[in-house]
Amino acid sequence: MTQRATQRPDNFEKPAHWSDTPPPKPKPPEENPDDPQGLSPTRYGDWVKDGIAIDF
């Protein structure tokens, strides 16, 4: 079995485009006032047609 590296080599230099800042947190979803149930199909991936949940 091959052992995985657990440390970077001593001669490793971080590329200039790498950042130490964490990624931004995602924005909360915008609620659609036209959706009476509040379950947007674009958010949850399901569409309801004739009482049956479908996705594409």
Image (cartoon, rainbow, N blue to C red):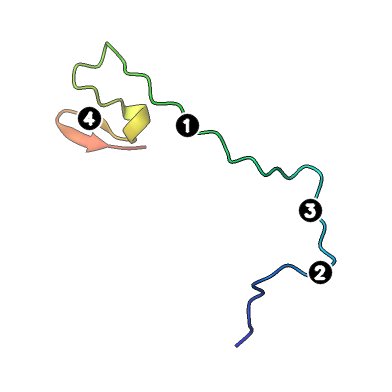
CA distance for labels 2 and 4: 56 Å
Q: Position of residue 39 (x, y in %)?
A: 25, 26
Crowd tier of the residue under label 3, counting other residues whose Cα lies within 10 Å: few below 14, some 14–19, many 20 or above:
few
Residue tagged 4? 48
Query: Toward which corner of the image does residue 4 lie, by quadrant?
Result: bottom right
Quadrant containing the C terminus in the rendered view? top left
Q: For the point 70% across and 42% down, which residue is it?
A: 19
Residue tagged 3? 14
Asked whether 12 or 49 is in front, the reply is 12
Q: Nearer the viewer, mark 3 or mark 4?
A: 3
Q: Nearer the viewer, mark 2 or mark 4?
A: 2
Q: Quick check: marks 3 and 2 in contact, CB under 8 Å?
A: no
Asked whether 6 or 45 is in front, the reply is 6
Quadrant containing the N terminus in the rendered view? bottom right
Q: Position of residue 42 (x, y in %)?
A: 37, 28
Q: Earlier in the sequence, mark 3 or mark 1?
A: 3
Secondary structure found at label 3: loop
Q: Earlier in the sequence, mark 1 or mark 4?
A: 1
Q: Earlier in the sequence, mark 1 or mark 2?
A: 2
Report the amino acid beneath label 3: Lys
Report the amino acid beneath label 2: Asp
Secondary structure found at label 4: strand
Kindly identify which numbered label has been placed on residue 10: 2
Report the amino acid beneath label 4: Val
Secondary structure found at label 2: loop
